[in-house]
Amino acid sequence: MQRIMHGRLIYKILKDAEWREAQDGGPVEAPLDRADGYVHFSTAETLQSTLSLHFKGVENAVLLSFYADDFGDDLKWEPARGGTLFPHVYRRVSADEAQQTWRLDMGSDGGPQAPREVVEV
């Protein structure tokens, strides 16, 4: 596990119902996060592949950005998908910690598309 660069953004994708629950005071999480015991995040580099692999056909998905540094030691960079390091947060995450949110448009591949300003950094 590695520490991250200062000021780096990480991203969480939620289905519409999950986002509404988070806005009402529930945690920012999906069923997989509850099952695994940590909150799965993506980087700008892995975001579109995560959307394509896990959110095909999901309309009205919401993307949230968070400062990685805000999670301190609760953030762990762990290998997944072919050894690529992904950020995982081992604590409750709340919607008010998000820096920015986007409602994602559907792409021609039938899955949500990452915002251009996120993936073309």
Image (cartoon, grey):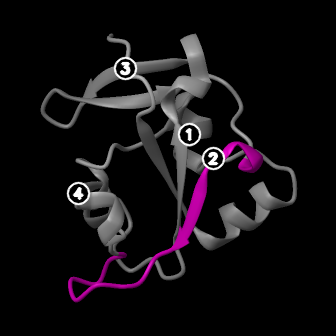
Percent position (x, y) of residue 67?
53, 36
Question: What residue occupies the far bottom of the structure in this picture?
Answer: 108
Q: Are marks 1 and 2 in contact (CB under 8 Å)?
A: yes
Q: Is residue 76 magenta?
A: no
Q: Are marks 2 and 3 in contact (CB under 8 Å)?
A: no
Foreground tag (3 vs 4): 3
Which label's residue is closer to the chain start, 3 or 4?
Answer: 3
Foreground tag (1 vs 3): 3
Residue position for label 1: 33
Percent position (x, y) of residue 110?
28, 84
| Quarter where residue 23 is shown | bottom right
Q: Secondary structure at mark 2?
A: loop
Residue position for label 3: 4
Q: CA distance from mark 1 to mark 2?
A: 6 Å
Q: Which mark is residue 29?
A: 2
Q: Which residues are magenta?
A: 95-112
Which label's residue is closer to the chain start, 1 or 4?
Answer: 1
Q: Secondary structure at mark 4?
A: helix
Q: Are marks 1 and 4 in contact (CB under 8 Å)?
A: no
Percent position (x, y) of residue 71?
59, 24
Which label's residue is closer to the chain start, 4 or 2?
Answer: 2
Q: Secondary structure at mark 3?
A: loop
Image quadrant in which the C terminus is located: bottom left
Image quadrant in which the N terminus is located: top left
| 40 versus 50 height, above or below | above
